[in-house]
Amino acid sequence: MSYLRYVPLDEAEYPAFAEIRQAFGFIPNFFRVQTARRDLIEAELGLVGSVLVKEGALTRRQKEYIFLVCSAANLSTYCVTAHCEIVRMLGLKGPEPEDVAIDHASTDIPEADKTLLDFARTLSLRPTAVGAKDIDGLRQAGFTDAQILEAVLVVGVAKFANFTAFGLGTVPDFDNPKVNLQRP
């Protein structure tokens, strides 16, 4: 499950796991492998809850799509697999989440959302390439400053989750033959 020793906990012993199950529909290995530092799991839950889970300026669908696109760009099989299942568990309507992750431009999502996902991918892969013209492009596509801020934060959370999963050797929670991203 991980490079680290796993400290098994259940929801009765650790109520944060009940919160995680409620938010995601299951307890991802991502959190299970961090049980050596429960305080850090709780801090992450606050961040993830505020940025990704709670209703905000962007829809949950838009935020999950940003997470998927960034995770695919970062070659995080773990995060793409997990969030494809989360999209399904939440009943978010739209194209197959794997299609959004791998090639959002060829899906039938709105053009404004494609612009948002293009921005997110660029920010994730080449953050120093992002400038005022990119923000202006998002505004021209109809996004508010609050939505742009939230998108940037979702990219940051995705990057954090991707790198944490890599560093801990987190094994995917689900078998998804459509997702097999290869690191160079």
Image (tube, rainbow, N blue to C red):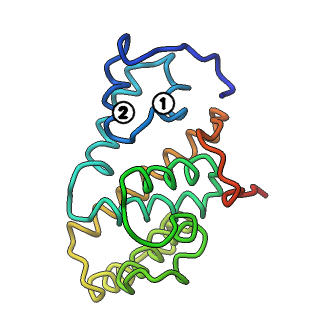
**Residue 86 — which label?**
none
Residue 171: image location, x then y, percent: 65, 36
Picture mark count? 2
Which residue in the structure is indicated by mark 1?
31
**172 sits to left or right of 23:** right
Residue 30: image location, x then y, percent: 52, 35
Quadrant (top left/top right/bottom left/bottom right) for the N terminus: top right
Q: Are marks 1 and 2 in contact (CB under 8 Å)?
A: yes
Query: Mark 2 is on which residue type?
Result: Ile
Of residues 83 and 175, the one nearer the viewer is 175
> Hey, which quadrant is residue 164 in on the image?
top right
**176 sits to left or right of 26:** right
**What element does badge 2 sit on?**
helix
Q: Please tell me which residue is depicted at 79% across the width and 58% down the height of the picture.
A: 184
Residue 178: image location, x then y, percent: 67, 60
Of residues 7 and 154, the one nearer the viewer is 7
**Residue 20 — which label?**
2
Q: Earlier in the sequence, mark 1 or mark 2?
A: 2
State whether residue 160 is above or below residue 92. Answer: above
**What element does badge 1 sit on?**
helix
